[in-house]
Amino acid sequence: MTSEWQGELLSELGRNLVQGSLTDPRLLQLTAGPVQRILPDANVVKIGGQSIIDRGGKAVFPLIEEIVANLPRHQIILGTGAGTRARHAYSVALDLGLPTGVMSVLGTFVSMQNARMIHYLLAKHGIPFIEPVQFPQLPLYLVERRAVVFFGMPPYTFWQENPAVGRIPPHRTDTGAYLVSEVFGARSMIFVKDEDGLYTADPKKDKHARFIPKITVDELRAMDLQDVVVERAVLDLMANAQLRRSVRVVNGLVPGNLTRALEGEDVGTLITAD
Amino acid sequence: MNESHPGDGRHHVDSLLMRESLIDKDVVAATHDGAPLVRMLPDARVLKIGGRSIIDRGRQALLPLVAAIGEALASRTLIIGTGGGVRTRHVFSVGLDLGLPTGVLAQLAIADALGNAHILGTLLAHHGVVAIPPEIFGHLLPFFVKGAPGVIFNGDPPYSIWEHPPPVGRIPPHRTDAGSYLTAECFGCKTFTLVKDVDGLYDADPKQSPSASFIGETSVAELRERALPSLPFDEILLDLLERSRLVKRFQIINGLKPELLAPALDGEHVGTIVHAG
């Protein structure tokens, strides 16, 4: 029936897609083009698990206040990290020889706990927690309530790709939050962590680590750092991004940083694809 | 267990990975050689039935294959993924024309493969084999395959709007071949078979050049080196196979020759075998 397909096709591209191979680079080239920004006014903000939420009220309460204070001016899609309980679950899973896909399920549960806690702190402002199945309601909530909370893990579960090295799911909450900002063409992607941004080494372990205020993905890859402040998958995906070609990392322990980042000010580290 | 570590301010749970950066190269490398991986469903065989190549052809191609699947089910547990076929190509073309991003195209495509899963499920219903909704498929899979000789699912991985933007263009890279393979890999299944309308791999498209020569067996590295003009499977399968831990090869067979199905499911060489290394 394929070859006799006579349905209505919009274009030459449509004919090529129906008849051609999706591995043909010439055909794939034809599928490039301008992409709609679905939610151009929304900001995606990811709150770190180990870096922020595991610190409890001391770190979380001021951040919640700052988020609420920003709502009149900014729409915020809030994602959550997983943190120390995910590290515990991953450790147990490694010991038992559980596959990466199962570890991805476990990480999802922890980031969901964190999303629920952040959600209850914001509930009195009418802000909902949405699971992936509720994402079609997200635009309404943003317009009506200015923010939503979601769990940062991408919902890959058993279908998480294996990493090149080791067994820890390579696509975790930084990646899940970033992909939300990319698919919706969001205004910004802000990672809220407990360091001022990117350093040449982990500043918690190396006192000589040097701060990097601005860097491109290519430069960062060339440095081949031992540790990076965001998941490496985010950098790989940014290189191919159609819309969200920069991300910012700020220290959420410093009051005002998130506000400055939302205002587009130069705070923390800006990582760009170009 | 729950301790606050002085000078840190973060409440940690004691574990091997406590306080560690999961991005640090040494931490990641330390997780490489752990306990032997659990194979959740070592006796099950995963196959993916092509959408455009098989299901869209209608009864002429599908009914003989369904009969072969029915026979295979008598002595084997099958997990069957379906492709979306020509309807997916059509929705891609409309979505691209409207300027919709890759993640949205991936989300839209799920419906087509799901429709084909239900088409196949209708034909296999009398064996007790039906299409399982994607929302419960992964978690309940071990339960279903104990109660039924096989299950059918839409081959798509649940990436949806979280699909990765590809290096070129906007077509979602993780399609139904990739999703079906990842099912086999995560559940540690016995074999993974791609059922298409060609005998396997050729050094050129056999539909266009009759002199194309057949490749019976190859590897990811060899295929990367050959850089064939097109492949009869999702290109990202090469990356996924390269990183495989449990299912280190797959076979492409011609579903228009249904007699090849049972031997392929048992790992016999009847099409093109692609090895990880």
Image: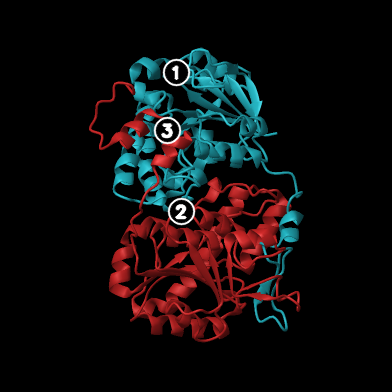
Chain colours: A red, B cyan
Instruction: Please name the residue shown 39% across and 36% down the image.
Output: B113
| Residue type, mark 3 in image | Gly
Tags 3 and 2 touching, CB below 8 Å: no
Tell me where residue B167 appears, x and y as whole percent. 50, 47
- From the viewer's perspective, tell me whether residue A152 is left or right of residue A209: left
Task: For mark 1, give the secondary structure.
Answer: loop
Give the Cα separation between the discs numbered 2 and 1.
35 Å
Picture coordinates of residue B73, whole percent (x, y)? 51, 22
Question: Are the numbered discs 3 and 2 placed on the same chain, yes or no?
Answer: yes
The percent position of residue B111, horizontal first and vertical second, equals 35, 41
Check disc 1 and give the amino acid type: Lys
Do dots 3 and 1 share one subunit? Answer: yes
SS for dot 2: helix
Task: Tell me the residue that label 3 is attached to.
Answer: B83
**Disc 2 marks which amino acid?**
Trp
Q: Quadrant of residue A204?
A: bottom right
Whether B163 is drawn above or below A179: the answer is above
Which callout, 2 or 1, points at the residue further toward the start of the chain?
Answer: 2
Chain letter of the residue carrying label 3: B
Q: Nearer the viewer, mark 3 or mark 1?
A: 1
Camera-nearest residue between B184 and B224: B224
Give the Cα distance between marks 3 and 1.
20 Å
Crowding around mark 1 (Cα neighbors within 10 Å: few <14, some 14 to 19, many 20+) is few
Find residue A88 and name its label. none
The disc placed on residue B207 is 1
Q: Chain of mark 1?
A: B
Residue on which the image places disc 2: B162
Give the residue drawn at x 43%, y 75%.
A120
Q: CA distance from mark 3 to mark 2?
A: 19 Å
